[in-house]
Amino acid sequence: MDIARTPETPGGNVEMADAAPQPKAPPMIRRDDYRPFGWLVPETKLDFELGLESTHVTATLTVARNAKADPAPVIRLNGDGLEPESVLVDGVPATNWTMDEGDLMLPLTGEAHEIRIATTIQPSTNSQLMGLYASNGMLCTQCEAEGFRRITFFPDRPDVLSTYTVRMSGPKAQFPVLLCNGNRIAVGEGGDSHWAEWHDPWPKPSYLFALVAGDLVARNDSFTTMSGRKVELNVYVREGDLDRTEHAMESLKRSMKWDEEVFGREYDLDLFNIVAVSDFNMGAMENKGLNVFNTKFVLADPETATDADYDGIEGVIGHEYFHNWSGNRITCRDWFQLSLKEGFTVLRDQLFSQDMGSAPVKRIEDVRILRMAQFPEDSGPLAHPIRPDSYREINNFYTATVYNKGAEVIRMMRTMAGEERFRAGTDLYFDRHDGEAATCEDFVEAIEDGAGLDLKQFRLWYSQAGTPKVSVSLEHEGNTATLRLGQVVPSTPGQLDKQPMPIPLKLALFDRASGKHGGEQLVVLDKAADTFTFDGFAEKPVLSINRTFSAPVTIERDVPREDLVFLAAKDDDPFARYEAMQELMTGHLVAAVSGSLGDNDRAAARADIARALGAVIADATLDDLMRGELLLMPGQTHIAEQMLVADPGRIHAEREALKAAVGAVLAEDLVAMHARASTLPFTMDAAGKGARKVKTIALTYLAGADPERASALAASQYDSADNMTDRQGALMVLAGLGTAERTARLIDFYNRYQGNALVIDKWFALQASSLHPQAIEHVKALADHPDFTLRNPNRVRSLYMAFAGNPSAFHAADGEGYRMVADLILALDPINPQTAARFVPSLGRWRRIEPGRAALMRSELERVAAAPHLSRDTFEQVTRSLD
Ligand code: ZN
């Protein structure tokens, strides 16, 4: 994208002489422009005089010229909304500094200096939740990516590593707990006030700084590391939340053990603190020794958290903990390298969760997330490589591409190398770059050298955006099966011509009669087209390809329905079984939506699908967790993604019709499955979780076929529930129905959990994501509910992310859904731009939607683009989406 492009005005007339001046586009930052910083900052001392309304900050920086950089006569200290109250160089007031945008530019003449700067900030008015802010009477920080510059002037870039010593003081009653990175080295008090001093021995970039002050209580525990060091562990929460922290603590200990065993990584401080805060833009943050978490990823008990919440907590606790090595000990040279820490750490948290629970089910869930969130990103206007080339606002690049596709790319290296050699590669990486700010290239080189792989061509996965399409066909003649593969990497914004990439595909060829194969093989397709032959097949085998989803690609093949039915029933790779079942349903739905199906074909396809699903219900070799995966219908987004231009209304209608048809054919099997699963007592093991999963799936199919019966069964599941998974599942089904049970249970749920923010979030989300025909009216009413606020990101997401992800409501044909989301973006942007900008992609998909709706979506984007004073975050997303 070119620099400084002004947004197109609705009339498209850029020549209008006396049109209102368009605000200047924020500058484009480019990866190629990276230069090392001119100064080193070996030591940083911070002094905080804490107050909710006003906090005084004194920063003392020791700086020295960086011999590896071009000489810099002026040091640039980033600032955002700050005013320097005093600037001292070597103890002497400086007067020769200037301001450039928000940054402080200070000329320095010597080789080394001490800079001292005082600022005052206002945490309680900080609604962006970046920098130091107030949440529920406590103070906390969020510095990644560029929040530290809202606290004090500093070279706020990840390649400037410094050792921090922090003193903080404040009223004892208001802030009894004072936390920072590293170890507490001194405490003291005087009158109503007290103070603490913290020192972090590990040099770190400013984005890993954290401070917390508040009235908190902790669950404590300890962990003894592989070399026998005892580490104190604390999970800090508000009083009253303590009994919901056990799972978080157990997850932390499991993470620490797992990273030692699987990656050989040991923790490196005597203390590890986690703090839960209820106002947080993201999931959690890996600040050194002081992880700050969204309460959503800490608090759980069976009464208020679902099985998915429990899994989410374990995964995110693992993720942040694993960052201690992949992110903190080795950090990023610049923000274009974000996937260096995020892609790798997501892979690490995925592997951890695979090992803690059902590996195949976790893999299926991760692929589903990738397809739901990343594939649409990769095929839309915001597509970017996992290592982007440019940005205006880095917050916009904390994406499913950088995180989840980034993880897939590293997983492919692991698949090609094998676990052992991959481990040799990561060992070399940690060894070689410990203490450094590294690049993705450094990582690839380390894997190449350590694992003994040639990744020359593979590097394209870092530079090319777009999900490759792999065409597959299998021919058979004599004793030979011939596999023809082709690949196309689609054009994406700014990248029209693509080169073929190495695509590792695990495959197996099944003998139809025995249902067996002669061993899984790995082929790497590294050309535009290639052919592979396999001998010893008297009959044409059934092909199972991209097993375990070995490559993040779309497979395009013409495969007979009977082969899919075969694989769905017989494949020994659980992922491939799931995939076959999905393909069976998706293939039918795409054909039905495109209008290419006659009545007989439609009936035949539905019957095959119902039979295959019935076989899954009956298959005694399956556990319920896996059974649940095999029974899930493909999501509307996934179906839409298969079509060049989608009609959301038709997709919804066909999908509901299939659900109803299956629900009718299998009604008694579904009811029996529900009854069987209902006899199990509540346990947190796989059997218990699986039982709860299939119960709610049974209800969803029944709801399509027989709403009255489903409603009664759901109401009884709700009423007898002794856990949130059952209760929420039942309420989700009820929320989509127009029955009397619906209203009563929604009211009950609210009354039961009023005051528990995380559960009330569920109450909002259930209604906003429901299949109810009036969902859009419900969302409007909920926006006026006294519990709704734009100031809390969890609450905003619970209503509007759920709504934007509910195609049947969001894509209302008259454009009302689009209007509501555009209104939200405009209202939220001045309060919390980072969160506001995250709603733009839902409108940005207009090119892939049928023309009537596309025009409505586009005009809402234009309305947003035309608003004065848009944040950099929203400006960038909206202009890219209109381009
Ligand atoms: Zn992360």
Image (cartoon, helix red, strand yellow):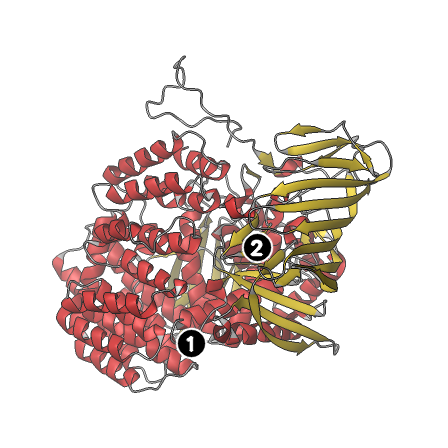
The numbered mark at residue 58 is none
C-alpha span from label 2 to label 1: 52 Å
Residue at horizontal 33 percent and vertical 44 percent from the top: 821
Name the amino acid type tagged 2: Leu
Taking 145 as reference, is 666 above or below it? below
667 relative position to 455: left or right: left
Precedes in sequence: disc 2 or disc 1: 2
Q: Which residue is mark 2?
A: 139
Residue 742 found in image quarter: bottom left
In the image, residue 28 lies at what x, y percent?
A: 56, 33
Taking 386 as reference, is 192 above or below it? below
Q: Is residue 333 visible?
A: yes
The numbered mark at residue 572 is 1
343 relative position to 371: left or right: right
Circle 1 crowding by C-alpha within 10 Å: few under 14, some 14–19, many from 20: some
**How many numbered markers are drawn?**
2
Circle 2 crowding by C-alpha within 10 Å: few under 14, some 14–19, many from 20: many
